[in-house]
Image (cartoon, coloured by chain):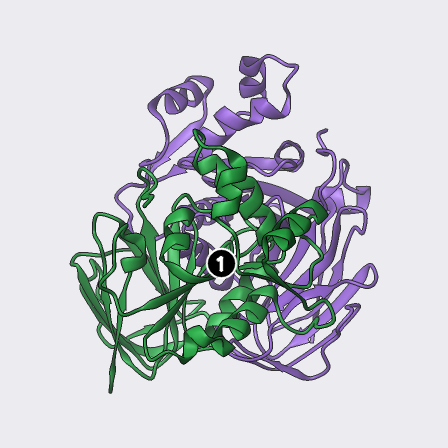
Chain colours: A purple, B green
Amino acid sequence: MEVMFHSSSFLLPSIPADEASSTKYAIVVLNQKLPRFTPLLWEHAKLRLCADGGANRIYDELPLFFPHEDALLIRNRYKPDVIKGDMDSIRPDVLHFYLSLGTKVIDESHDQDTTDLDKCILYIRDSALKQESCRLQILATGALGGRFDHEAGNLNVLYRYPDTRIILLSDDCLIQLLPKTHRHEIQIQPSLQGPHCGLIPIGTPSAKTTTTGLQWDLTDTEMRFGGLVSTSNMVKGEKITVESDSDLLWTISIKKQDSTTP
Amino acid sequence: MEVMFHSSSFLIPTDKTSATRYAVVVLNQNLPRFTPLLWEHAKLRLCADGGANRIYDELPLFFPNEDALLIRNRYKPDVIKGDMDSIRPDVLDFYVSLGTKVIDESHDQDTTDLDKCISYIRHSTLNQESSKLQILATGALGGRFDHEAGNLNVLYRHPDTRITLLSDDCLIQLLPKTHRHEIHIQPSLLGPHCGLIPVGAPSAKTTTTGLQWDLTDTEMRFGGLVSTSNLVKRDKITVESDSDLLWTISIKKQDPTRP
């Protein structure tokens, strides 16, 4: 079984050279409060999308991360490449501002079958960024919290694109899909992440999951809703391995500290 | 198959006629704006560990024209339970001096704070009485996702106990596969956004009535179709499924429905 490697270098102020040459990031901002490290993710990304009301968040909240700088300067600096979605949340003044800066606006209000995050993932996969011969990693903020049906729909996006690296990020944690088709090696940044973590069998029970590197490792352990789900676990080292017969969601807490603004 | 009835009367200010007895559990996230209303309905009020900080700090903010100390005395938990690693010492001392029962479960690391509170309520006299018991829990969503998942799992692990998770934005309830479900909603307070989520296992066949996009023996699974961003069309929704589902509906933003 092939190994899939996971790293969280995007949380570092500068990405190690070997990774920087092999991984390209795209960022999608959804309509919840921006995590405090959003400027850092934005700087790492080669392609920056706002899903509908996510543009309001960039407009309103990014300047708050730079209280000593002029808001207009910040808004000009952090300009999305694309705003996509059904356009029922974005404010007219925000839309006009980014249009005048040259942001591409794609109105998908006719398509009610897919979520805003779906639409953005599809755009990124079809974009030039994906054609390049390197790993693409999509970082999405604002996918958690708020209405639970929204959150569930966003978690389902991870399951529906198991071959696309998508990471959901909030101030408190990150979530990634670990497809059952691979063994997983997760490298963590102990100064930035953990120790709290979990493995969640959303969608289907797992008959056998095995891990290393956790406080409470699993050994061919069954996990299911209604029974054992690995929550409030803790990482013990810097490398975690996971192997399972079922797709799992891996989640790890993000440490509260000074904003890692570039 | 027996029918299970669901209503959200706990969101209505005056509901003296209901045969349901409520217990409220407050977990450690921002208090929803209707927390005072839930508190008033409840016969048993628990704080799970840091939930006590929330009651202490945030309840007075719902009553800005009243004295904070008066509010804290009025909204006094019956019990504070959990592993006690989040509650502030000053908050703990305050409620202990008011007579709140404090149960330190720091030795038990196998169950979540919500688990511990559910067990307490199930063993209490409130559950012995011959009336329906409904547990209302705030603060179970948001924050760390592993916490949230653990709290959702509490619903699956106690399928015969009525537990409703509440936030400012929505509520979540388990619809066990063992029953047909009739959900009565208050359109002035709930909706229209809703969803049915097969969190634990796929559903081969789910059938609904009352939704904008009803399901008819429809398969639902993560990786495929999950009913999200649906809309309620009527005041009564019915659901029947071969799998346990989570029902969720949005809560309308409006003035706090204080008693």
Tell me which corner region of the image, top left, top right, bottom left or bottom right, holds residue A84: top left
Q: Amino acid at mark 1?
A: Leu
* Residue drawn 64% across the image and 52% down it: B97
Relative height, residue A190 to residue A75 (above, below)? below
Q: Nearer the viewer, residue B161 or B75?
A: B75
* Residue drawn 37% across the image and 31% down it: A90
Q: Nearer the viewer, residue B26 or B103?
A: B103
Residue holding disc 1: A155
Q: Is residue A118 left or right of residue A63?
A: left
Relative height, residue B132 to residue B226 (above, below)? below
Residue A19 position within the rendered picture, expressed as x and y whole percent measured from the top left:
76, 47
* Residue drawn 31% across the image and 53% down it: B11
- SS for tag 1? helix
Name the chain letter of the residue that bears numbered label 1: A
Q: Is residue A134 visible from the viewing direction of this image?
A: no
* Residue drawn 67% across the image and 57% down it: A252
